[in-house]
Image (cartoon, rainbow, N blue to C red):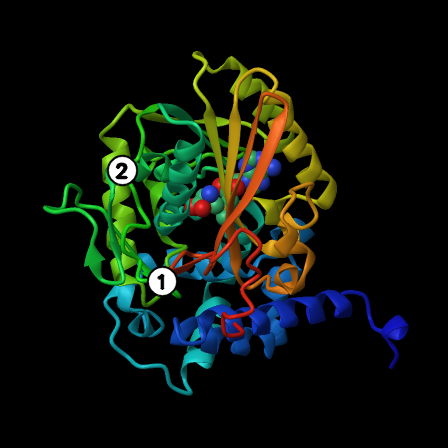
């Protein structure tokens, strides 16, 4: 049968199969034995793929399926499947029963899963990405000393807005003595000692998140959905997330407003009081935007920079950044094809001038960060992913 003769939906099923296999090989491998095995298992089981194929196209996300199952497991800790999930108290090692146990669980809860998959959206708040924000803010501070306002677009629950309230541990070494925060952000620094890459953050005058579907931390269901995106083995990450949620819930310093990146960013930036520069942070936002929407978003930042300096600090996939107007020569080479990694950088816009800078390469979840050795570095010295 040629591709043109395939039954409707076959091409979409193939696309999802590729997605699961890519995720299993590039993200699950070495980090999550459960998700590595389940990615292959879902790719090879039409009834599991059908769970996603039966949802609207924009809902067909691998992360949604894994989170929906994880959410159900949180209230079924005694189930056979939960036994494989350390975050739910499970101790069973991955074995050849995992995929069939997962399939049986999905079969029993098919209606609940169908409901979650059609109605919910991906809601992660990855606190480790604050490492990218800190590096970006340091860079901005070197060019524009003094206080800055902070806006995150695609902020989810807004937990990254409190980046300067967390402790950072680089290569296992604490960067603050004594620890000032119960929320500890750990990151491995590759290709550098890691010493002194984080400086003291400047004063943050205000902290605002923009999200088209903000997470309301006062809603226990919304908190549980956020926690459902934590991977089965990530006990430490779950504790960090819960600590950050508690901190955010106890302060009025941040707020997340409902807004759309390509339509509301310039207006919200313009409405901010004061004249200090604004750092606009995005972390894993561009994958939600079409190529045209990405250009519109960058245009919003440029429009806002006519009134006050605006620095875009980002940690995003290089291939997506390469489709914007960023002037980063490294993105014109092989780096733009390394989409299983993220590029951390900053684009400073003010007084009619723009200065774009590549700061480093990172794992999408900032489990590791590798500082650029020079502004044109395209990381040929980094081993392939
Ligand atoms: C993967 S999450 C990342 C959250 C956070 N930046 C982090 O790194 O932890 C992406 C967020 O972007 C939001 N989002 C997606 N498309 C958007 C858009 N067009 N405008 C505003 N927010 C959007 C989603 O609702 C979601 O909260």
Task: Determine the residue positioned at 38% across, 54% down.
Answer: 228
Q: Is residue 235 left or right of residue 264?
A: left
Total marks placed: 2
Q: Is residue 239 left or right of residue 12?
A: left
Q: Earlier in the sequence, mark 2 or mark 1?
A: 1
Residue 201 lies in what quarter of the image? top left
In the rendered image, residue 218, in percent from the top left (x then y), is placed at: 31, 32
Measure how far apart labels 2 and 1 are at the Cα level: 19 Å
Label 1 residue near ligand 1, CB within 8 Å: no
Instruction: Check disc 2: other Cα within 10 Å, few if <14, some if 14-19, many if 20+.
Output: few
Q: Secondary structure at mark 2?
A: loop
Q: Look at the image and tell me whether residue 109 can be seen.
A: yes
The label on residue 192 is 1
Q: Secondary structure at mark 1?
A: loop
Task: Determine the residue positioned at 55% across, 56% down.
Answer: 114
Relative depth, front residue between 308 and 367: 308
The label on residue 1 is none
Q: Look at the image and tell me whether residue 111 can be seen.
A: no
Image vertical order of residue 325 relative to residue 193, above or below: above
In the rendered image, residue 339, in percent from the top left (x then y), is placed at: 59, 61
Image vertical order of residue 201 relative to residue 305, above or below: below
Image quarter in which the N terminus is found: bottom right
Label 2 residue near ligand 1, CB within 8 Å: no
The label on residue 200 is 2
- As drawn, which residue projects farthest toward the front? 374
In the rendered image, residue 258, in percent from the top left (x then y), is placed at: 51, 27
- As drawn, which residue projects farthest toward the left? 178
Task: Determine the residue positioned at 82% across, 71% down.
Answer: 7
């Amino acid at each position: 049968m040629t591709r043109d003769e395939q039954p409707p939906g076959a091409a979409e099923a193939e696309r999802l199969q590729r997605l699961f296999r890519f995720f299993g090989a590039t993200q699950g491998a070495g980090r999550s034995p459960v998700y590595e095995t389940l990615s292959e298992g879902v790719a090879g089981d039409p009834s599991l793929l059908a769970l996603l194929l039966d949802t609207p196209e924009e809902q067909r996300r691998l992360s949604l399926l894994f989170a929906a199952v994880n959410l159900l497991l949180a209230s079924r800790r005694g189930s056979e499947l939960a036994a494989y999930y350390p975050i739910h108290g499970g101790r069973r090692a991955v074995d050849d029963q995992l995929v069939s146990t997962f399939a049986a669980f999905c079969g029993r809860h098919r209606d609940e899963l169908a409901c979650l998959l059609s109605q919910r959206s991906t809601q992660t708040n990855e606190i480790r990405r604050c490492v990218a924000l800190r590096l970006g803010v340091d860079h901005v501070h070197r060019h524009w000393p003094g206080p800055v306002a902070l806006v995150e677009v695609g902020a989810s629950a807004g937990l990254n807005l409190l980046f300067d309230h967390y402790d950072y541990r680089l290569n296992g070494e604490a960067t603050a003595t004594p620890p000032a925060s119960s929320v500890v952000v750990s990151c491995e620094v590759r290709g550098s000692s890691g010493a002194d890459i984080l400086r003291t953050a400047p004063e943050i005058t205000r902290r605002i998140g923009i999200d088209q579907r903000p997470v309301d931390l006062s809603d226990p269901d919304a908190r549980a959905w956020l926690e459902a995106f934590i991977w089965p083995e990530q006990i430490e990450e779950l504790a960090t997330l819960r600590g950050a949620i508690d901190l955010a819930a106890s302060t009025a310093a941040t707020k997340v407003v409902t807004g759309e990146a390509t339509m509301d960013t310039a207006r919200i930036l313009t409405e901010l009081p004061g004249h200090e520069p604004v750092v606009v942070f995005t972390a894993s936002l561009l994958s939600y935007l079409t190529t045209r929407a990405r250009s519109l978003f960058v245009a919003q930042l440029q429009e806002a920079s006519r009134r006050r300096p605006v620095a875009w600090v980002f940690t995003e996939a290089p291939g997506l950044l390469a489709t914007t107007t960023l002037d980063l020569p490294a993105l014109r080479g092989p780096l733009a094809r390394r989409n299983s990694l993220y590029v951390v950088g900053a684009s400073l816009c003010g007084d009619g001038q723009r200065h774009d800078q590549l700061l480093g390469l990172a794992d999408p979840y900032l489990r590791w960060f590798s500082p650029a050795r020079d502004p044109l570095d395209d990381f040929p010295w980094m081993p392939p992913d």
